[in-house]
Image (spheres, helix red, strand yellow):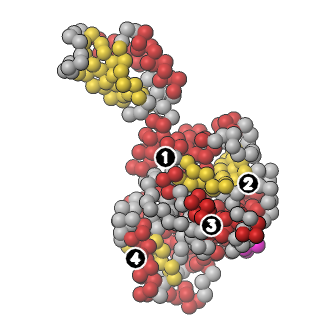
Amino acid sequence: MSAADTPIPPVGVADVRAARELLAGVVSVTPMAGSRALSELCGGPVWLKCENLQRTGSFKIRGAYTRIARLNAEERARGVVAASAGNHAQGVALAAQMLGIRAAVFMPERAAIPKVGATRGYGAEVHMVGETIDGSIAAATDFAERTGAVFVHPFDHTDVIAGQGTVGLEVLEQVPDVRTVLVCTGGGGLVGGIAAAVKGQRPDVTVVGVQAEGAAAWPPSLAAGEPRSLAGMRTVADGIAVGRPGDVTFPQVAALVDEIVTVGEDALSRALLHCLERAKLLVEPAGAAAVAALLEHPARFATPAVAVLSGGNVDPLVLLHVIEHGMAAAARYLSLRVRVGDRPGALAELLALVGSLGANVLDVSHSRISGTLPLGDVEVALSMETRGPEHCTELVRALQDAGHAVFDVAGDR
């Protein structure tokens, strides 16, 4: 895209500064945590911008409050309506409560129970409609047409972009020598707003959007020069699973964001686990996308780098699944089959050997019935928790050195 073809961004740094004045006393200035582990990996300072510690557990309150606070008296009297599976719902509910405005929120029928409860707790009228967010959006749009309530879009509005951009102002103040800012990217409101704040003051800083590979609408849209819809999406990072860039966010991102990269499900899971274990921070899969990009490409981004942790609202069941997936992706699980002699004490000796090597046995299955087993042998299937790839190799070698035949070695459960 030539300079003449570059879109004009609808939101600039002055808009973000105005939003910051509006948000004074409403949102928290979230902490900036240093990451020793990521700094060592990337060869320079890496910082984590902790929007997971923001009010309602994500950055969404910034844009929602900015949008709702700027409604006129007649619009406020009609109330607001939103559609969301979680973070935006809570942001709209709290913003409306603070401003004394009625709020209705439509959420998918399978939305996480903690997120539904939190949204109701902020005073919103919650409607569970649709299998996916698309059904909830359709219902919310119909509600707005029937009642006159103002639809508060999760990302595609200039006030929302400006509000989210206040994160970028804080980044520059907290890490003045920053060279790269990495931001999880769905519809583009957060990365577009941060880019406005950062580029408006430090055009030399690189702003990188990070998408999940299973929901990456931005690369094909940018290549086409216009928003394009995905045929389908599949990712654990539901917070950034947006099938089409917004008409407002598209020129914002196209003009100001330097690069969009994608990360896979394994990388997202490992990033969430990294945040839990090394940074002691609870982050949802979408919120860990920037960390995933650093783990996948540690030498690609100039440091000092800031990874924005966009939110920490995660269903406990999803968290359990993602942690297990992340441990498997990091070779922290090992499953294999071992043949041992069919004699008293053989299984106990095998388990004692595994225990002495520091592995934690999760599952064990002992079988004498198999057409491939030599007479006098039994097969033991083991699933173990390990310390990583080198430990897995050590375990297999030790079992073989002890005279055991080892089969079907896999670094997962």
Question: Disc 2 or disc 3, which is closer to the eye?
Answer: 3
Q: Left of 126 or right of it: where is 172? A: right
Residue 206's label in the rendered image is 2
Left or right for 256, reference 321: right
Q: Which residue range is magenta in the image?
A: 14-18
Asked whether the beta carbons under mark 2 and mark 3 sit within 8 Å of each other, the answer is no
| Secondary structure of residue under mark 4 | helix
Label 4, on which residue? 139
Q: From the image, tell me which residue sits under label 1.
A: 265
Instruction: Give whichever of discs 1 and 4 has the lower sequence position.
Output: 4
Q: Residues within 10 Å of mark 3 (few under 14, many from 20)?
A: some
Question: Is label 1 or label 3 in front?
Answer: 3
The amino acid type of the residue labelled 3 equals Gly
Q: Earlier in the sequence, mark 1 or mark 2?
A: 2
> Residue shown at 63%/55% (left/top)?
260
Predominant secondary structure in magenta?
Answer: helix
Tell me how far mark 1 sits from mark 3, CA to CA: 27 Å
At label 2, the amino acid type is: Thr
Question: Residue 224 colored magenta?
Answer: no
User: Considering the image in quadrants, where does the C terminus appear?
Assistant: top left
* In this view, the mark in front (2 or 4): 2
Location of mark 3 (residue): 225
Question: Is 174 located above or below residue 76 in the figure?
Answer: above
In terms of image quadrants, where is residue 395?
top left
Q: Position of residue 313 (x, y in %)?
A: 50, 56
Secondary structure under the numbered disc 1 in the rendered image: helix
